[in-house]
Amino acid sequence: MAKSLSYITAELEWAELKLKEWREYVDTNPIAALKDRIEWKPTSKGGAIPMVIASKEAQIKSIRDTMKEYLALLEIVDKLRQREAEKKEARGGKAISGKMSQLE
């Protein structure tokens, strides 16, 4: 049982790190400040032309998708936290030993 508990704890910690990353991404890219990202592409004759690498609309869609994924993962993490808290409460916060651990 201890192995599965540590596995779930590790997964929760990983998911919480991802939630933090996604939130920072959304916070550092406010929609009102977005502009088309343009880079200069070299031409075959030695010149360069501007190319839109990421339009404002594409960036907004990316942020929206990130927010949707963030909220979905947040809901899952909350459910897993509740489930783990219920398990600890049922056990009295102590590890189960012997034959009782085989029943789970």
Image (cartoon, rainbow, N blue to C red):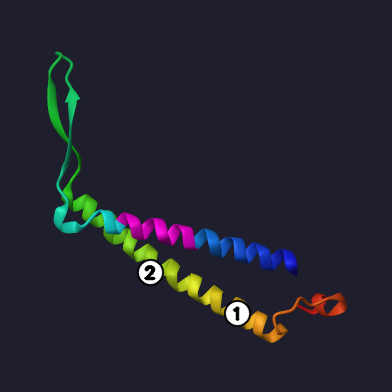
Residue 93 found in image quarter:
bottom right
Describe the element under mark 1 as helix, strand or loop. Answer: helix
The magenta span reads 16-25
Magenta stretch secondary structure, dominant:
helix
Residue 86 found in image quarter:
bottom right
State which quarter of the image contains the C terminus: bottom right
Which residue is at the far right? 98
Q: Residues within 10 Å of mark 2 (few under 14, many from 20)?
A: few
Describe the element under mark 2 as helix, strand or loop. Answer: helix
Question: Residue 96 vs residue 62: left or right?
Answer: right
User: Are dots 2 and 1 in contact, CB under 8 Å?
Assistant: no
Q: CA distance from mark 2 to mark 1?
A: 21 Å
Question: Residue 98 vs residue 71: left or right?
Answer: right
Measured as percent of width and height from the top left, residue 38 is found at 16, 37
Q: Residue at x 76, y 76 (%)?
A: 95
Measured as percent of width and height from the top left, residue 11 is found at 57, 61
- Residue 26 is inside the magenta segment: no
Sequence-first disc among 2 and 1: 2
Residue type indicated by callout 1: Ala
Q: Residue at x 66, y 80 (%)?
A: 88
Residue 66 found in image quarter:
bottom left
- According to the picture, the residue beneath numbered tag 2 turns out to be 71
- According to the picture, the residue beneath numbered tag 1 turns out to be 85
16 or 42: nearer the viewer: 16
Q: Residue at x 23, y 51 (%)?
A: 59
